[in-house]
Amino acid sequence: MKLFLRNVSGEPFCNSKEGIEMTDIEEKRDIKSLTLPQLQEQVKQFSEPAYRAKQLYEWMHRKLAADYEEMTNLPKAFREKCREHFTYTALTAVKVQESRIDGTKKFLFALPDGNLVESVWMRYKHGNSVCISSQAGCRMGCRFCASTLNGWERNLLPSEMLDQIYAITRLTGERVSNVVVMGTGEPLDNYENLLRFLLLLTDENGLHISQRNVTVSTCGIVPGIRRLAEERLQITLALSLHAATDEKRRSLMPIAEKYSLDELMDACTYYFEKTGRRITFEYSLADGVNDTKEDAEELTALIKPLNCHVNLIPINPVKERNFRQSDRRAVDGFKNKLEKNGINVTIRREMGRDIDGACGQLRRSHMIKQAE
Ligand code: SAH
C-alpha cells in the first residue's frame, strides 16, 4: 500500500515522491498508526459524521487514551465498531527503575505479543526528554551494544513507538518536549514506520512536538540517510561513528563492512545540504580502543569539512562485551584535542548511572531472568 502523507491542510508532510510504504501493519487494522485523513476516510465508510474522526484522533493522540473505554463522548456503538475493525495497541509497564541521582526513569514495556522494549525518561532544564526504541531487538550487531545480543525480533509499528511516549506521559503526569530515537533498534532499518511515527508525533492534532526537538540516531545505513535527507525534515540526525578509520570502525560495527566512511561522509554532507540541519556524531569512548590522541586527530581530519557537532559518550560497559570505559583524563584529553582542532564537542552527561544505562541492558537482564 502506498500512502502519500499529507497533513490536515493538505500540504505534503514530506518530500517522499514515491509515497510511503507501510510495513508490518495488517492493512488499516492498527488504528493508532492512521493519519487523520485516513481516519476520516474510515469514519465515512462507517456512515458516521465526519467530526467523529477528529474526536477519535484527539482521544488517541492528544488525550492519550489507553483504550476505547475512556472515550466517553463517543457513542458506544461507534466505539464497538472501531473495536471490531481495528486493533488498539497498548503497552504494559513491566518494570520501572528510577535513578536516585538525577530522577531518570527507565521503563520496560511489554507489547501485546509479549515482546519487550525499553524507554528512558530524562528531565533536563529545557524540558523532559524520552528515548524510545524503534525495534524489538536489533540486527546491526555493534560489538559494544547489549541491544543486539539477542538478535532482532521485529519492527515496531508507528503506534508502538508513540505508545512509549504516551505511556510515559501518563505515568509521569508530565509533558514530554523532546524525543530521541536512540533506544533499542536501528530506526532506518524500520524506515516507513519511523516516518509515519514522525508524522503523527509532530502533527498539530496530536502531541505536536516540534521536529527540531526530535533526534533520530543511526548506525549509518547510507541509502536510509539519503532517503531521509530527501524528506527535508527539520529533525536532528545523529550518526553513530565511534571510529575514524574504516578498519577500526569495521572491528566495532558490522554495518561498516557494507558502507565505507567515504560513502557515509558523503551521505552526511548530502543530509546537511538538503535539510540545513547540522549532523551530530556520536562517539563512544572505549579504553585503549578509540580514545587516543591519534584517534582524535583522525576524527578531526574526517569530520572537519562538515558542519557538525560531536557527542562523546564514555562507553557503558556491557557484561557480555569486554570494553572498558575510558577514564576521565582520556575523555577530557580527547575532548580538548577536538576543541583545539576547532570541532564543536560535548561530553554526554551520564544519566541514570545507578539504574544501569547501557542500551538494551534492562531488556536483556529481564529476558535472561524469564528464561531461568
Ligand atoms: N541503532 C541506532 C540507535 C540505537 S543506539 C544507532 O546505532 O545509532 C544509540 C547510541 O548508543 C548509538 O550511538 C550506539 O552506538 C550507542 N551505544 C550502544 N551501546 C553502547 C554502550 N554500551 N556504550 C555507549 N554507547 C552505546
Image: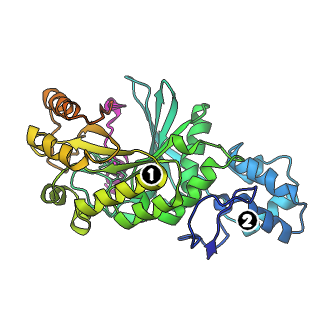
The residue depicted at 25 percent of the width and 40 percent of the height is 316
Q: How many marks?
A: 2
Q: Disc 2 designates what residue? A: 38
Q: With respect to residue 174, does 319 lie above or below?
A: below
Identify which residue is drawn at 52% across, 56% down: 232
Where residue 120 sits: x, y (%)? 44, 40
Looking at marks 2 and 1 on the same chain, the residue that comes earlier in the sequence is marked by 2
Q: Which residues, given as a range, are shown in magenta?
A: 350-372
- Residue 339 image-quadrant placement: top left
* Residue 137 visible in the picture: yes
The secondary structure that most of the magenta stretch takes on is helix
The quarter of the displayed image where residue 166 is located: top right
Question: In the depicted view, which residue is nearer to us: 331 or 82?
Answer: 331
> Looking at the picture, which amino acid does disc 2 mark?
Gln
Q: Quadrant of residue 82?
A: bottom right
175 lies left or right of 115: right
For residue 69, above or below residue 139: above
Please name the residue that numbered disc 1 is placed on: 133
Residue drawn at (31%, 37%) of the image: 356
Nearer the observer, 200 or 64:
200
Q: Is residue 124 magenta?
A: no
Sort mark 1 into few (<14), some (14-19) or many (20+) by Cα contacts within 10 Å.
many
Q: Mark 1 is on which residue type?
A: Ser
Image x and y of residue 317, in percent: 21, 41
Element at label 2: helix
